[in-house]
Image (spheres, rainbow, N blue to C red):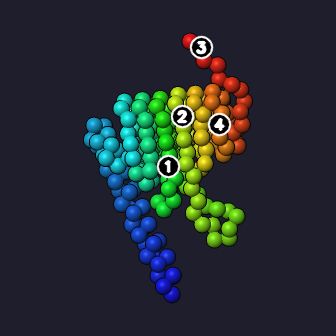
Amino acid sequence: MISFLKKKLFLQTFLFYSYTLNIMFFVLDLLPPFIRFFIFKFGLKSLGTKVLIDYKVFFRYMSKIHIGNNVSINRGCEIFTSANIGAYVILKDHVTLSPNVKIYSAGHDYNKLELPDSAGDIIINEHSWIGANSVILQNVTIGEGSIVSANSVVTKDVPPFSIVAGIPAKVIKKRVINV
């Protein structure tokens, strides 16, 4: 009986948090950029300089998200971390997320019938570009200088200076930088 009550209390607490968060992001979308930046600076684990966070961007559990310098997060992007498992999302310097990118460092362990929470860090290294509508799942590192093609689902690490595409994303070629 006590276990049932704990679960019910947890669910009600989560639903209240989710409700409050949705109201907060609705209000954030009405505010001018300099006020939004101040709120993000306060809420995120770290926030670098020269960062663009477009409108209609959503973060769940902001205190587990690191954003470096010169990062661009376009409209409709969503970043989900876990409340009770210590997984982080780290966007290093000069990262671009195209519109509607989804990053999920939290999920469920499908090997167990109860589907307990699982989580793993997601690290997107310097000078990487994530194409529109792509999905990045937990325990993934995107190597420096890599490109994830639009509409890809990244389930495994991406080597540095690679271009990946598909569902699941696979390396299609190496990225050559012309100086």
**Residue behind mark 1:** 88
Write the residue at 55% across / 45% down: 122
First of labels 1, 2 by sequence position: 1
Is disc 4 placed on a helix, strand or loop?
A: loop
**Residue behind mark 3:** 178
Per the model, the C-alpha gap separating discs 2 and 3 is: 20 Å
First of labels 3, 4 by sequence position: 4
Which one is in front in this view, the residue at disc 2 or the one at disc 3? 2
First of labels 3, 1 by sequence position: 1
The three-letter code of the residue at mark 4 reads Val
**Residue behind mark 4:** 158
The local crowd at label 3, few if under 14, some if 14 to 19, many if 20 or more residues have their Cα within 10 Å, is: few
Residue 141 image point, x, y percent: 60, 40
- Pointer 4 with pointer 2, Cβ within 8 A: no
Residue 116 image point, x, y percent: 60, 66
The three-letter code of the residue at mark 1 reads Tyr
Is disc 1 placed on a helix, strand or loop?
A: loop
Write the residue at 53% across / 28% down: 127
First of labels 4, 2 by sequence position: 2
